[in-house]
């Protein structure tokens, strides 16, 4: 398996984040990538590949132009305003309609952020416009890391499209919480969505995105919610009591051309492998029925039993079985790294998924 490695990921090195009323050490720590890389080197026949710079076109095909301009200048604007430390929002515009309103299309949640702000606006206004959570500080190298994370996803997508061999996009920050025009959940650019859209642009007819991170892939859902050419499926902890809280419900199935091309499979706390496997069975049926010719897997391993925010209770052995089930789809597959923050197990859990997948290729759906 080829592992496209974002060697510039460590430029995003914020030291702390605000979580549940406390300042804690940043969960998305740069050490995560080295742990996974080293684990792969010892356990999987992986070939490290340096990504190619493909420029901005594929990023702009997914993300709002004003939002991208904000991200690329946020740190400079923050410094120019005289602030120290990482950039975090301090104020948000109040919304008359709550984004948790059951009658509001998930695709509308970031619509307020799509309006263009004048460049001279104060950075706190821009942060309040584009951030939806306090957990994603922006530091000196955050844009560089995010940009190269996207290039890593594009390069890996190109490789899968070219010869069909499975590839793994290993980079950070993660991406599946990044909407078309807002950010949160440690995510700035949506690498999985960028890869899926790039595959479509390169000639793939129908692309499926399968998100197995414990958190709902709200950003990916938002980006493709009104489209029928990309199927989005997310298996995650039920949002009533879990981030991102306001999306991930089963009734969110898409709208317009995207009607019935979004599937959410929320799981109860401590669902374990039995519940997750049942959910994956539903996901597989949906993907098979969609007749996808390419698969992008948002690979999060934060549902493990020792993860700091884990609630589903999966084990490393479970992740091996999950990899086998994904392989049984028989699709050309790109894995994109998402969450997973327990340093003691993140490497072995990623290895388990990819080993299960590589060992399961060729089995029947």
Image (cartoon, grey):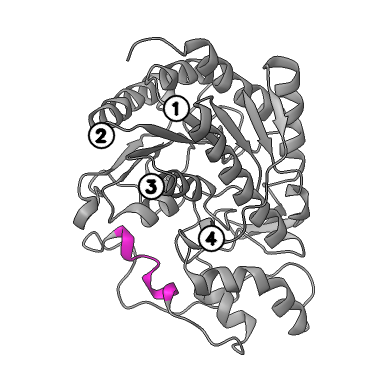
Sequence-wise, the earlier of marks 4 and 2 is 4
Residue 286, horizontal then vertical, whole percent: 26, 31
234 or 165, which is in the foreground?
165
The residue carrying mark 4 is: 57
Sequence-wise, the earlier of marks 1 and 2 is 2
What is the CA distance from the residue labelled 3 to the residue labelled 1? 30 Å
Look at the image and say whether residue 113 sits in the magenta stretch. Answer: yes
Q: Nearer the viewer, mark 2 or mark 3?
A: 2
Q: Magenta part of the protein: which range?
A: 106-114
Q: Secondary structure at mark 1?
A: strand
For residue 5, side relative to residue 71 (left or right): right
The residue carrying mark 2 is: 290
Q: Residues within 10 Å of mark 4 (few under 14, many from 20)?
A: few
Question: Which residue is located at x 56 percent, y 32 percent?
Answer: 301
What is the CA distance from the residue labelled 1 to the residue labelled 2? 15 Å
Quadrant location of residue 278? top left
The residue carrying mark 3 is: 239
The residue carrying mark 1 is: 332
């Amino acid at each position: 398996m080829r592992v496209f490695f974002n060697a510039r990921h460590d430029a995003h090195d914020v030291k702390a984040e605000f979580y549940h009323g406390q300042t804690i050490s940043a969960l998305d720590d740069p050490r995560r990538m080295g742990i996974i890389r080293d684990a792969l080197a010892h356990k999987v026949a992986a070939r490290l590949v340096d990504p190619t710079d493909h420029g901005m076109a594929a990023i702009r095909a997914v993300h709002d132009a004003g939002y991208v301009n904000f991200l690329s200048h946020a740190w400079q604007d923050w410094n120019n305003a005289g602030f120290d430390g990482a950039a975090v929002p301090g104020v948000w515009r109040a919304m008359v309609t709550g984004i948790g309103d059951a009658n509001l299309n998930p695709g509308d949640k970031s619509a307020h952020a799509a309006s263009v702000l004048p460049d001279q606006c104060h950075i706190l206004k821009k942060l309040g416009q584009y951030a939806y959570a306090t957990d994603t500080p922006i530091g000196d190298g955050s844009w560089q890391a995010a940009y190269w994370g996207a290039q890593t996803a594009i390069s890996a997508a190109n490789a899968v499209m070219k010869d069909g061999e499975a590839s793994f996009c290993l980079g950070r920050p993660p991406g599946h919480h990044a909407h078309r025009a807002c950010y949160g959940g440690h995510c700035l650019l949506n690498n999985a969505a960028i890869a899926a859209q790039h595959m479509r642009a390169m000639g793939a007819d129908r692309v499926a995105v399968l998100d197995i991170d414990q958190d709902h892939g709200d950003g990916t859902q938002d980006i493709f919610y009104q489209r029928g050419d990309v199927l989005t499926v997310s298996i995650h902890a039920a949002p009533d009591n879990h981030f991102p809280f306001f999306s991930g419900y089963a009734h969110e199935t898409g709208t317009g051309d995207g009607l019935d091309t979004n599937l959410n499979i929320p799981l109860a706390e401590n669902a374990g492998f039995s519940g997750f496997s049942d959910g994956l069975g539903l996901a597989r049926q949906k993907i098979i029925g969609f007749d996808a010719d390419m698969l992008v897997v948002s690979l999060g391993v934060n549902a493990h039993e020792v993860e700091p925010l884990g609630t589903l209770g999966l084990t490393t052995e479970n992740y091996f079985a999950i990899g086998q089930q994904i392989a049984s789809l028989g699709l050309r597959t790109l894995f994109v790294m998402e969450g997973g923050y327990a340093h003691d197990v993140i490497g072995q859990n990623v290895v388990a998924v990819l080993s299960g997948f590589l060992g399961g290729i060729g089995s029947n759906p």
